[in-house]
Amino acid sequence: MAETAFPIELSLVGANTLATVECDWHTADGTATLANNDYQAASGHVTFAPKVTTAMITVFINGDVARENWETIAIVFENPVNATLRDFGFGPGSGT
């Protein structure tokens, strides 16, 4: 089946207003898995200019005809610059 672009908006909490904030990211299995061909692995680097608190990334979802519940893809963040990654009890970011 066809792939579909799945845009995900990222938000900074307590954004630094004086410095550029950067971070690496990559996808990881949630209830959607690479083994089931649910999505395509992706990774990248995101940059927030000073005073900017949102950015977009895109993950590609593979369509199928299986009847399934909503599935999630985890987004893992690493190597922050001018920021601290915090776990607010939700684990990695995710898209459904």
Image (spheres, rainbow, N blue to C red):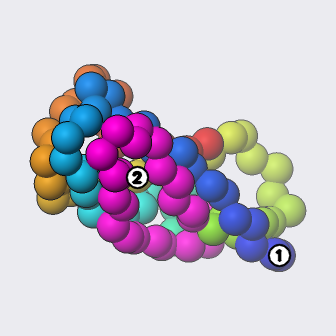
Please, what is the three-letter code of the amino acid marked with disc 2? Ile
Res 86 → quadrant? top left
* Front residue (pair 56, 71): 56
> Residue 1: x and y, percent?
83, 76
- Asked if 13 appears above or below 78 in the picture, the reply is above
Q: Nearer the viewer, residue 44 or 88?
A: 44
63 w.r.t. 83: above or below: below
Q: Which mark is residue 63?
A: none
Measured as percent of width and height from the top left, residue 13 is found at 32, 28
Residue 86 appears in the figure: yes
Q: Quadrant of the C terminus?
A: top right
Query: Residue at image x 56%, y 50%?
Result: 8
Q: Residue at x 40, y 52 (%)?
A: 75
- Classed neighbour count for the residue bearing mark 2: other residues with Cα under 10 Å, few (<14), some (14–19), many (≥20): many
Tell me which segment is drawn in magenta. 37-59
Q: Amino acid at mark 1?
A: Met
Mark carried by residue 1: 1
Quadrant of the image occupied by residue 81? bottom left
Front-lying residue, 39 or 43: 43
Q: Secondary structure at mark 1?
A: loop
Marks 1 and 2 sit apart, C-alpha to C-alpha, by 23 Å
Badge number at residue 75? 2
With 69 as the anchor, is 35 left or right in this view?
left
Circle 1/circle 2 CB separation < 8 Å: no
Horizontal relation, residue 33 to residue 90: left or right: right
Q: Position of residue 33 (x, y in %)?
A: 52, 61
**Where's residue 90, x and y in %?**
34, 28
Residue 56 vs residue 11: left or right?
A: right
Q: Earlier in the sequence, mark 1 or mark 2?
A: 1
- Asked whether 48 or 36 is in front, the reply is 48
